[in-house]
């Protein structure tokens, strides 16, 4: 039997988080049948073993919507894992991509699936991300931080429509060196090939350390510059879209929401100042390179570091 939805999870070193992600899938409401495929990408921990043990002990009788849970090692690099899961292992024409460290709100899969059925013009319906179940950000503010890019943590694609869009742009698969698959999809599908669905929500653990903010920021900036450099024809198309102002402004808005989102207390002011220092002082003086180190699966500079400062 072909499942209604294939849930595809690229995972790297997620042994501590993957069970929570799988539990949130099992708790989805509705009658859609679901297969779960976890692509373990160059992990150095026991992510693969954890998923296999979870699948072995899973109670399929009390969770009839879950058809199967499988895990496999995939080729190094998230783009390679994306291609392998989508084109070699998934059985459904509606595929959900989600991260291995998030929890998905119960109605989200049903909501995304319904939106793809209602709008035949879009190839991707993307959810939005919050930091916790208790997060109390005014709706207009957290929508602002989610308005531009496809949310890489949670989106559903209609495979046939997505492949058609890729073929129109002369892509057979996602380029293996892509650092940000959600950024690449946003460029590919803009302006009318995707839609944000604010009723589909995933919850992501917030950044609590400066190193976490910094790692995310440098990865986002490296991915941004790679897209600008390697795919200028796609970038020029989306830059002309009125919804896009400045990638730095988007990142800044998102970072401010991170700093404010979990708690509304004075310490958020210090976090906001710290984030402004990071985005406006540190990052502009860094010379970023968008090369993927295929031995480690990480983005590095030409000298093997994430970035090097300009002389």
Image (cartoon, rainbow, N blue to C red):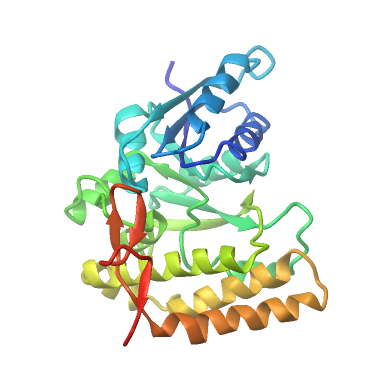
Closest to the observer, 133 or 17: 17
99 or 96, which lies in front?
99
State which quarter of the image contains the C terminus: bottom left
Give the residue drawn at x 83%, y 74%. 265
User: Is 309 or 268 nearer to us in this picture?
Assistant: 309
Residue 2, horizontal then vertical, whole percent = 42, 20
Quarter of the figure with the N terminus: top left
Counting from the top left corner in percent of width and height, residue 215 is at 50, 64
Quadrant position of residue 57: top right
From this view, report whether residue 228 is shown above or below residue 48: below
Can residue 296 be seen in this snapshot? yes
Q: Is residue 207 above or below residue 37?
A: below
Query: Image check: 38 left or right of 233?
Result: right
Task: Establish if 38 lies above or below 142.
Answer: above
Q: Residue furthest top?
A: 61
Rendering coords of residue 196 (x, y %): 52, 58
- Tell me: 16 left or right of 91: right
Depth order, front residue of 87/48: 48
Decide if residue 274 is on the left or right side of residue 34: right
**Whole-percent x and y of residue 308?**
35, 75
Residue positioned 44% across, 38% down in the render: 43
Asked where in the image residue 242 lies, by quadrant, the reply is bottom left
Q: Residue at x 53, y 69 (%)?
A: 214
């Amino acid at each position: 039997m072909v499942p209604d939805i294939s849930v595809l999870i690229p995972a790297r070193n997620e042994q501590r988080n993957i069970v929570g992600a799988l539990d949130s899938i099992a708790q989805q409401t509705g009658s859609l049948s679901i297969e779960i495929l976890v692509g373990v990408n160059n992990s150095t921990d026991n992510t693969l073993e954890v998923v296999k043990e979870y699948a072995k002990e899973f109670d399929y009788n009390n969770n009839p919507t879950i058809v199967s849970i499988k895990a496999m090692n995939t080729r190094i690099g998230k783009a390679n894992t994306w291609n392998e899961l989508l084109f070699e292992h998934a059985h459904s024409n509606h595929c959900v991509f989600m991260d291995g460290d998030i929890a998905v709100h119960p109605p989200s899969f049903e909501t995304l699936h319904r939106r793809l059925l209602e709008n035949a013009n879009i190839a991707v319906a993307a959810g939005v991300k919050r930091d916790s179940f208790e997060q109390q950000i005014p709706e207009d503010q957290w929508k602002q931080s989610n308005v531009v890019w496809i949310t890489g943590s949670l989106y559903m694609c209609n495979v046939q429509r997505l492949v058609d869009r890729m073929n129109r742009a002369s892509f057979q698969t996602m380029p293996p060196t892509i650092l940000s698959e959600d950024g690449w999809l946003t460029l590919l599908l803009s302006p009318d090939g995707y839609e944000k669905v604010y009723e589909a929500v995933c919850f992501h653990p917030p950044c609590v350390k400066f190193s976490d903010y910094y790692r995310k920021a440098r990865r986002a900036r490296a991915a941004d510059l790679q897209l600008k450099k390697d795919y200028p024809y796609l970038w020029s198309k989306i830059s002309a879209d009125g919804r896009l102002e400045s990638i730095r402004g988007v990142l800044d808005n998102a970072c401010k929401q991170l700093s404010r989102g979990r708690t509304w207390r004075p310490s958020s002011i210090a976090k906001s100042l710290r984030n402004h220092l990071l985005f406006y002082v540190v990052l502009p003086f860094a010379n970023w390179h968008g090369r993927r180190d295929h031995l480690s699966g990480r983005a590095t500079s030409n000298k093997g570091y994430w970035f090097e400062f300009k002389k």
